[in-house]
Amino acid sequence: MYPSTLEKLMEYLRVLPSVGQKTAERYAMRLLELPKEEIEAFANQLLLVKERIHKCAICGNLTESEKCKICEDPSRDKEVICVVQQTKDLIAIEKMGSYNGVYHVLHGAISPIKGILPEDLDFQNLFDRINENTKEIIIATNSTMEGDTTALYICKILKPNTHLTVTRLASGLPTGSNLDYADELTLMHAFKGRIKQ
Amino acid sequence: MYPSTLEKLMEYLRVLPSVGQKTAERYAMRLLELPKEEIEAFANQLLLVKERIHKCAICGNLTESEKCKICEDPSRDKEVICVVQQTKDLIAIEKMGSYNGVYHVLHGAISPIKGILPEDLDFQNLFDRINENTKEIIIATNSTMEGDTTALYICKILKPNTHLTVTRLASGLPTGSNLDYADELTLMHAFKGRIKQ
């Protein structure tokens, strides 16, 4: 019904996560309203990102240079590696501001349902990075079925390295939340992980 | 925190309606995953749309040629004009499939709060189109404060044209809905507009 050029643009917009026909329509209409220069700058940025952004050779974080800023930073503690599923998880931890180790970004999690097996993720690079100097691996995968599976897999592989401490982020009540609003699984985890005062 | 090229892309994505930082991040990550050719095609489509799509010289509908397909269609009844706020409203009515008149797309509605006054919308083209052959103007603006104001404005201007029937889409209970779920205003409109059986 829309002119074909516009339909085609909507088709591209629907590639974005959870964007359906209605949202693609709204986005296309908004884009149409923008001045020509802005659209050109947007289109150009898309190409630039694809051209310049790639994974850090060491940790998998997104970067414009060969190694990411965190891996290049001499003040970061290279003996502690925090394993995350996505770059956005790394960003969240960085925003917290109190972690001074380095990262390993898997860019996914093991999910037999989605057909994502260990060999599809960047575990080898992680295991290769670990040496006698490595003190701790902090597994910061999501508190979901997939995140748990991934954590379990990493634990199993790393078990023989007795010099290594492998930890996982605590599960429990979110700070500031009311106990009665927590779902049963969260509450169960909070009970299991209770800490002696 | 993200590489600057990526941050810049997120900035552009935030221009889209109701896209905040989190959504822009998700979109940018998805775009990064796409193969180079798809990103290039997407960027190209953005430019194409801006270049090719414009408003129909007669009705304001979006088109790639001078006049839109509906205005060019000799089988459409040019004596009935349906006034809508947005192109997507026209598309919705076309999908209904039982309207054979033509349209007038205002690309907005009067909204003193948002600073949109009658002179900011394409009313003049509408009034200029109306001639002695025009039988009916169907006002199909939204059932909102802004849509109502716009409808009222059109009615007032067209009142002197006594040969013209000006109608507005009925307000009432959505088909298939339960009465007890309707809000009071909808129910009030449904009562006011009750039809003798």
Image (spheres, coloured by chain):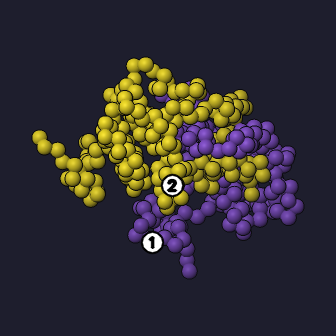
Chain colours: A purple, B yellow
Q: Residues within 10 Å of mark 2 (few under 14, many from 20)?
A: few
Query: So how many labels did they put on this image?
Result: 2
Residue B15 image label: none
**Type of amino acid under label 2:** Leu
- Outermost left residue: B197
Task: Examine the image and state in which quarter residue A81 appears.
Answer: bottom right
Q: Nearer the viewer, mark 1 or mark 2?
A: 2
Chain to which mark 1 belongs: A
Q: Mark 1: which amino acid?
A: Asn
Q: Position of residue A108 (x, y in %)?
A: 63, 44
Tell me the residue at 56%/80% (across/down).
A197
For residue B149, what is the image quadrant? Answer: bottom left
Residue A156, position in %: x, y? 64, 49
Q: Is residue B39 visible?
A: no
- Side (left or right) of B195 relative to A116: left
Element at badge 2? loop
- Residue B51's spot in the image, x, y percent? 67, 32
Q: Outermost residue, top direction?
A: B74
- Where does label 1 land, which residue? A178
Could you tell me which chain the residue with mark 2 belongs to? B
Which residue corresponds to the image point at 41% horizontal and 30% vertical from the top-left?
B102
Task: Report the front residue among B133 and A180.
Answer: B133
User: Would you say A70 lies left or right of A188 here?
Assistant: right
Q: Is residue B139 above or below residue B37?
A: below
**B113 above or below B130?**
below
How far apart are the two marked residues, 1 and 2, measured between alpha carbons? 48 Å
Identify the residue at horizontal 73%, vertical 39% (top origin).
A40
Please name the residue that numbered disc 2 is placed on. Answer: B117
Residue A50 percent location from the top left of the image: 75, 38
The crowding category of the residue bearing disc 1, from other C-alpha atoms within 10 Å (few below 14, some 14 to 19, many at least 20), is few
Q: Nearer the viewer, residue B27 or A158?
A: B27
